Image: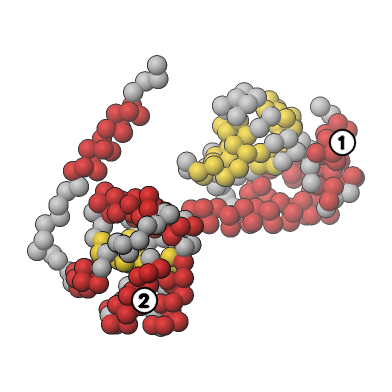
Amino acid sequence: MGTDELTEFLMANSVLPENFSKEEIAAFAEQLNVEEYPAGETLMREGTPACSLMLLISGEVRRMLGDVELDLLHAGEFIGKSMLTDEGSHYANVVATEPVVVGHLTIEHYGLLVEAAPVASRKFKQYFSDIHIQEMHEKQGLSFVDQRSYLGLVAHNEMKESLMLFARTHAEKLKRFHLVATGTTGIKLYQEVGLMISKKLASGPLGGDQAIGKMISENNIKGLIFFRDPLSPHPHHADIEALGRLCDVYQVPMATNPGGAAALLNFLLIDHPEEPAIPNRVLEKYRNAQKKVVAQPAQ
């Protein structure tokens, strides 16, 4: 694939024409070295030196950060943009999901581009650097891990006033926690009690209960206060039951009425070094069983 073909390919399949003239793109294309890779080949590895920018000419690659898929890239897209930045290494793994053809721009060939087209080379460096910075911001968002431990506050509509009264009574204690609440509960806690909510989720029936369940599984909930209405039917009853089940699975203390909630607050505010940790045998047994399933060879 010659320079003219690469230039026409970039003009037709990439976003470069939005920022560069055909002459500038031709100067860039002249420095590309075309290579082929089989499916499953790792084109770039996280942490390795950033010494190559690649144009995907055909095929598909998957960009991964650990076990998280960042995106799938197709013909006309670029990988390895960190080569034209101050970053010393690649921040993600890039694996071919099918046979691919790529055009390489090495550091040495970028040097030739600088000599042949100095103005265009600076424009390309700035262009790919800006995209790389945007991708790094996205990466930081994906890799962010919330280390805080929250106290969950949830109440059915019929029990919200009871929760407000409880919160007013125990406001000074509640202020000592990072609080997470669902739906209008968080707004009411601020408006009526003056409590600041660290994280506000959707209403229970709209996914808030499931969001708290996810936080429980990620060890972000130290205790859950859920004032449940025991005398009315609820359309999201399965979600409510799931919350209680997850509290049992992860041994998170849960209170469903004012008396239990008061006891829970007092318990959480006091260290209990004299109490030995009780192993979570059920969870350990389940995880060991799942490891055996994963280890079994495919039939």
In the visual, does 194 lie left or right of 45?
A: left
Does residue 268 appear in this view? no
The kind of secondary structure element at disc 2 is helix
Residue at horizontal 74%, vertical 45%? 111
Q: Which three-letter amino acid code belongs to the residue tagged 2? A: Glu
Q: CA distance from mark 1 to mark 2?
A: 68 Å
Mark 2 surroundings within 10 Å by alpha-carbon count, few (fewer than 14), some (14 through 19), many (20 or more): some
- Which mark, by number, is residue 154? none
- Kindly check if marks 1 and 2 are in contact, taking CB atoms under 8 A apart as contact: no
- Residue 247, by quadrant, is bottom left
Q: Which mark is residue 8?
A: 1
Query: Within the image, what quadrant is residue 25 found in?
Result: top right
Image point 28% across, 80% down: which residue? 170
Mark seen at residue 161 = 2
Q: Residues within 10 Å of mark 1 (few under 14, many from 20)?
A: some
Q: In the image shown, does 163 or 50 lie closer to the viewer?
A: 163
Report the side of 51 relative to 205 (left or right): right
Could you say where residue 46 lies in the image, as x and y percent from the top left?
A: 52, 42
Residue 51 left/right relative to 273 = right
Number of numbered markers: 2
